[in-house]
Image (tube, rainbow, N blue to C red):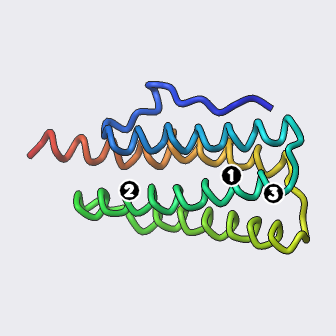
Amino acid sequence: MMEIEWTPELSVGVDEIDQQHQQLFSIINQLLEARIHNLGHRPVLSILKRLVDYSDYHFRTEDNYMIENEYPLFLSHRKEHLAYIKKTGEWITALERKDAAPTDDMVAFLCGWWRGHVATSDMQYARYINATQNNA
């Protein structure tokens, strides 16, 4: 598995959001490291909880930004966030109950979801907001 890397091409042009994306990628890489080094259940759960908490914080930042800028696709974007929150919440519950063990599939999903979400959905609102601000 390869680490997830933030690159300038993933910049949405808002420093606060770009910095949050970089922090999210960093936490995912910590999760990846924990899996590679087989650190076990408790460290993975701890890192996953930190990722979920920071994701919630980040989603609130994005939601406020999209509402403030009257982004017309806000609700569909928000649905993506809610689906992610549901899936990661289910993992945490399963790990806490020890119904599941940490898996490489979990890390692969997180890497793929964040790469895809930032590169498509987040870029979509960034282009919209940039275009409307430049036309104001």
- Regarding mark 1 in the picture, which secondary structure is present there? helix
The location of residue 28, given as percent across then percent down, is: 65, 43
| Residue at x 72%, y 44% (from the top left corner) | 31
Mark 1: amino acid: Ile
- Regarding mark 2 in the picture, which secondary structure is present there? helix
The location of residue 63, given as percent across then percent down, is: 37, 62
Q: Earlier in the sequence, mark 2 or mark 1?
A: 1
Mark 2 or 1, which is nearer the eye? 1
Q: Which mark is residue 62?
A: 2
Taking the view exactly as shown, the residue that stands out farthest to the left is 136
Q: Quadrant of residue 74?
A: bottom left
Mark 3: amino acid: Arg
Mark 2: amino acid: Glu
- Regarding mark 3 in the picture, which secondary structure is present there? helix
Q: CA distance from mark 2 to mark 1?
A: 22 Å
Q: Earlier in the sequence, mark 3 or mark 2?
A: 3
Q: Quadrant of residue 48?
A: bottom right
Q: Which mark is residue 42?
A: 3
Callout 3: few (<14), some (14-19), or many (20+) C-alpha neighbours within 10 Å?
few
In the picture of the structure, the residue carrying the numbered disc 1 is: 47
Mark 3 or 2, which is nearer the eye? 3
